[in-house]
Amino acid sequence: MGNFKVTKVRNSRIGLVDWDNLGFGRFFSDYIFVADYEHGKWNDGEIVPYGPMTDIEPANCTLHYGQTIFEGLKAFLDVKGGVNIFRPDQNAKRLNRSGERVCIPPFNEYRFVDSICELIKLDYAFVPKVRTHSLYIRPVVFGTGNFLGVHSSDTFRLVIMTSPVASYYKEGLNPVKILVSHDFVRAVRGGLGMAKTAANYAASLLAGKNAKEAGYAQVLWLDAVSQEFVDEVGAMNIMFVINDELITPPLGQGTILAGVTRSTVLTLAKEFGIKFSERTVSIAEVFEAHHNGTLQEVFGTGTAAVISPVGLLKYKGDIIEINEQKIGHLAQKFYDTISGIQCGEIEDKYNWNVHIDM
């Protein structure tokens, strides 16, 4: 484990947390980890109290040009004691892949995991005790240069914060309604779709707002060229079960984020002997499968929701109901297995958890 300078809080924020109404990303823990990149290298970093960053100037380049990336991962109480962080090494790798795409220097992956472990030791009281809740961990890196002009910053900051959270969707594990976008696109081939960068999410805001106003939880994005092939949902990758085959769009086009939960599900599918494929799937194929009775399940995979069943899909004027708006067998199996591993109830045979004894 790495040694980090720690500045202790004077007054804990624990009293500000409404444990009965956590929501998602509304409350923040006592500490953050902060590291700065200057003169061609990252400093050691330190853990300090959560609070405003008073050194951000109006000319900060990220405010103007969006040179920022982020990650999302979770920590869970282990039923046998201590805390489990689920697959943080994969988030460390993805953070650096995203950084490469927007000219942000890599951060040491081992130190990234160490910093999260030390942070959680200090913020242990903020790890929720409810089985379906967790401590969400949000690393973000952004340019700290102060200039006007489109070029990369020479200086950067990494901040890691934590937040006790409940389910991402108010529906919890109940199926959500998804609107298939045909007016907007999110990512193009060769663009930023494979990077977890702010621009992707800014591009999704208007369509997401329109979807929510129409009573839908999220938007399912199609490819930007033909608008025929499925990419992903705004906050999660998407999977279809058609004629007993698990199908999810491939990552090779560079328009889809390589989800950690997506990878986890595919690994488990192989273990379970489930037929699966990563291939292009058109929205027409999905609706045709529903009309001929072979569309069995649709569900999303992501850190925030883990597994989110889809009960309704609307595309233009056509609405289809999936599995009578009930969670499907495979979605339930994947959710139970992943959450069981995260909480220490099921053997972690793949060594996905980083365990912290408290």
Image (spheres, rainbow, N blue to C red):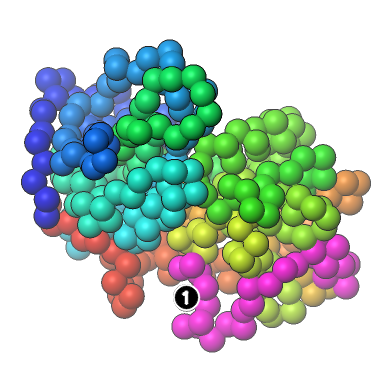
Q: Is residue 271 left or right of residue 220?
A: left
Identified by mark 1, the residue type is Thr
Q: Which residue is rendered at x = 29% and y = 15% of the image?
A: 54
Q: Which quadrant would residue 13 be assigned to in this image?
A: top left
Residue 251 can be seen, yes or no: yes
Q: From this viewpoint, which residue is outermost toward the right? A: 317
Residue 97: x %, y % from top left: 44, 54
Is 115 in front, or is 41?
41
Q: Is residue 274 magenta?
A: yes
- Is the N terminus in the top left, top right, bottom left or bottom right quadrant? bottom left
Q: Which residue is rendered at x = 65% and y = 62% of the image?
A: 253
Q: Is residue 147 left or right of residue 253?
A: left
Assign the magenta stretch its main secondary structure: helix
Residue 351: x %, y % from top left: 29, 72
Is 161 in front, or is 82?
161
Quick one: label 1, few (<14), some, or many (20+) residues within 10 Å? few
Q: Which residue is mark 1?
A: 267
Is 145 in front, or is 272?
145
Q: Which residue is rendered at x = 47% and y = 61% of the image?
A: 261
- Is residue 10 positioned above or below 97 on the image? above
Q: Is residue 272 magenta?
A: yes
Residue 71: x %, y % from top left: 41, 46
Q: Is residue 96 left or right of residue 53?
A: right
Secondary structure found at label 1: helix
Q: Which quadrant would residue 184 be assigned to in this image?
A: top right
Question: Which stretch is magenta?
Answer: 263-292
Q: From this viewpoint, which residue is outermost toward the bottom? A: 273
- Is residue 105 positioned above or below 237 on the image? above
Residue 343: x %, y % from top left: 31, 60
Q: Which residue is rendered at x = 77% and y = 45% of the image?
A: 181
